[in-house]
Image (cartoon, rainbow, N blue to C red):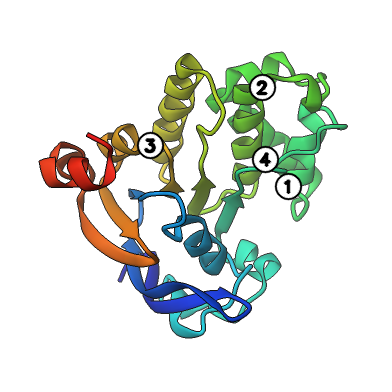
Amino acid sequence: MPLLKVDGVTSGYGDMEVLRDVSLAVEAGEIVSIIGPNGAGKSTVMKVVFGQLRPWQGKVELDGRDISRLPPYEIVTLGMCYVPQVANIFTDLTVEENLELGAFALAGREVAERKARIYELFPRLKERARQEAGKMSGGERQMLAMGSALMLDPRLLLLDEPSAGLAPKMVDVIFERIIRVNQTGVAILMVEQNARESLKMAHRGYVMANGQNRVEGPGPALADDPDVARLYLGG
């Protein structure tokens, strides 16, 4: 049984259909990347998975439980956290305060233990623990957003465009940190604009276009597939 299963989901906004019969799965401990052109429905999939948008047809299961009708705050308690592309930190608060807010459901000692683990994964956050988050670089903010989500020790982490707007060197740093997070046992479902690089680091990948699954397979194999490159990777 996969950790996450999206089964035949059709959904959209108002009367506008965006997803049509989309299916995907994430096994425990996997990195799975969703790629595709703008408007393919990638971020909409994430919203359906995290309960921000209801499926019109089909269902979403987490560890065998149907979560299609659950609100996000309940889904978080089941072991899934989501880092959206924008508005993913509290800019007026310090790094440490952001992490503590991420652990809203935990007691004091547990919060301290989790913060120590996050600082191990992201040493730069420890260096800037007292700094106001809004004064950090884009890459540092992304680390903080991931660190805040990891404070609740999720089994599955959703990342929506984690490298968007970052300088090339910082993109490499963020991808390296994503791999490190995954090595701690956290499964990751990622939507990413840097398609080729995200596929290379993923155990499996899904290519979407026009709201539907088009191709799926091992991530590195998709990255090297000439047909996928020609049709979806711009090369």
Q: Residues within 10 Å of mark 4 (few under 14, many from 20)?
A: many
Secondary structure of the residue carrying tag 4 is helix
Choose the circle earlier in sequence order: 2 or 4. Answer: 2
Residue lying at 87% horizontally and 32% vertically, measured from the top left: 92
Q: Are marks 4 and 1 in contact (CB under 8 Å)?
A: no
Residue lying at 42% horizontally and 70% vertically, measured from the top left: 63
Q: Position of residue 42 (x, y in %)?
A: 45, 56
- For the residues labelled 2 and 4, the Cα–Cα distance comes to 11 Å
Q: Is residue 27 visible?
A: no
Mark 3 residue type: Gln
Residue holding disc 3: 183
Which dot, 3 or 4, sits closer to the camera?
4
Residue lying at 44% horizontally and 78% vertically, measured from the top left: 10
Mark 4 residue type: Ser
Secondary structure of the residue carrying tag 2 is helix
Secondary structure of the residue carrying tag 3 is helix
Q: Residues within 10 Å of mark 2 (few under 14, many from 20)?
A: many
Choose the circle earlier in sequence order: 2 or 3. Answer: 2
Q: Are marks 2 and 1 in contact (CB under 8 Å)?
A: no
Which numbered disc covers residue 148?
4
Q: Residues within 10 Å of mark 3 (few under 14, many from 20)?
A: few
Which dot, 4 or 1, sits closer to the camera?
4
Residue at the farthest left position: 226
Choose the circle earlier in sequence order: 1 or 3. Answer: 1
Classify residue 183 by image quadrant.
top left
